[in-house]
Image: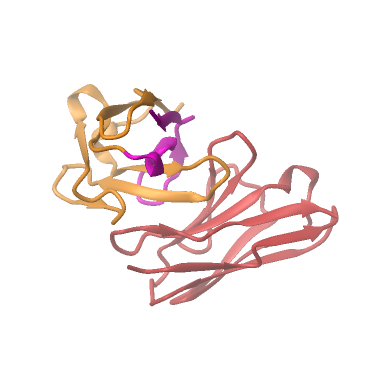
Amino acid sequence: DIQMTQSPSSLSASVGARVTITCRASQGISRWLAWYQQKPEKAPKSLIYAASSLQSGVPSRFSGSGSGTDFTLTISSLQPEDFATYYCQHYDSYPYTFGQGTKLEMK
Amino acid sequence: EVQLVESGGGLVQPGRSLRLSCVASGFTFGDYAMHWVRQAPGKGLEWVSGISWDSRSIGYAGSVKGRFTISRDNAKNSLYLQMNTLGPEDTAFYYCSRNNDFDYWGQGTLVTVSS
């Protein structure tokens, strides 16, 4: 099975800051990588698919990059509504797996 | 508007079975792969199972393989998860999600396995 490792597991940042979260796959997954945002007591929300494609309606301050085994999610200028937990996930082959999550907290 | 509505969760004793359903609307259900994802209270997301649009390709997480069965009925716009031999480790919110990039999610249904 492909393992997904996210870093950091938690992060404190201020409104307006630029934030980067990384995700590493245990083997190459091409660009079959997605990112999700989850707020407490809510279902996850899709942000990015195919490593760098923005889902419809997602603000352009979110961006993704990478291919193969190393990927990043960047938020260019943090807004108050961005404080949440973020997950990466591969969908290269079954079984799909998620990263352990990165909790983004307000500094 | 795309909507996914899960149902069938509840309190169940260890060793028993439960069947979850997910009813889809707002899109052509039969055109999309579908998935189940779960989240234990306070924990991260865990992919459980996925099924292709035509049911010919199915996958399971190792933690549920042999106990859970995913299926779909495209005529009824419905996705199912038959869960057998449930244990406390299966306690979680269960979400259904559309497509292999999980672009839409339901609100989830809670399964609690306890005596």
The quadrant in which residue A18 appears is bottom right
- How are the residues colored? by chain
Colour red maps to chain? A
Residue drawn at x 39%, y 39% as measured from the top left: B88
Residue drawn at x 49%, y 64% as measured from the top left: A51
Q: Is B48 situated left or right of A58 in this image?
A: left
**Residue B25 locus on image (x, y percent):** 36, 24
Tag count? 0
Residue drawn at x 68%, y 47% as measured from the top left: A84
Image quarter (top left, top right, bottom left or bottom right) of the C terminus of chain B: top left
B105 and B41: which one is in front? B41
Colour for chain B in the figure: orange
**Residue A20 locus on image (x, y percent):** 69, 66
Q: Is A86 situated left or right of B77 in this image?
A: right
Q: Is residue B60 visible?
A: yes
Q: Is residue A47 above or below residue A74?
A: above
Q: Is residue A75 visible?
A: no
Q: Is residue A84 above or below residue B115?
A: below
Q: Specify start and end residues of the magenta stretch as a single range.
A: B87-115
The quadrant in which residue A22 appears is bottom right
**Residue A2 locus on image (x, y percent):** 37, 69
Q: Is residue B7 above or below residue A59?
A: above
The quadrant in which residue B53 appears is top left
Q: Residue furthest left?
A: B56
Q: Residue furthest front?
A: B115
**Residue A96 locus on image (x, y percent):** 36, 58
Residue drawn at x 29%, y 41% as measured from the top left: B32
Q: Is B76 situated left or right of B44 in this image?
A: left
Q: Is residue B105 magenta?
A: yes
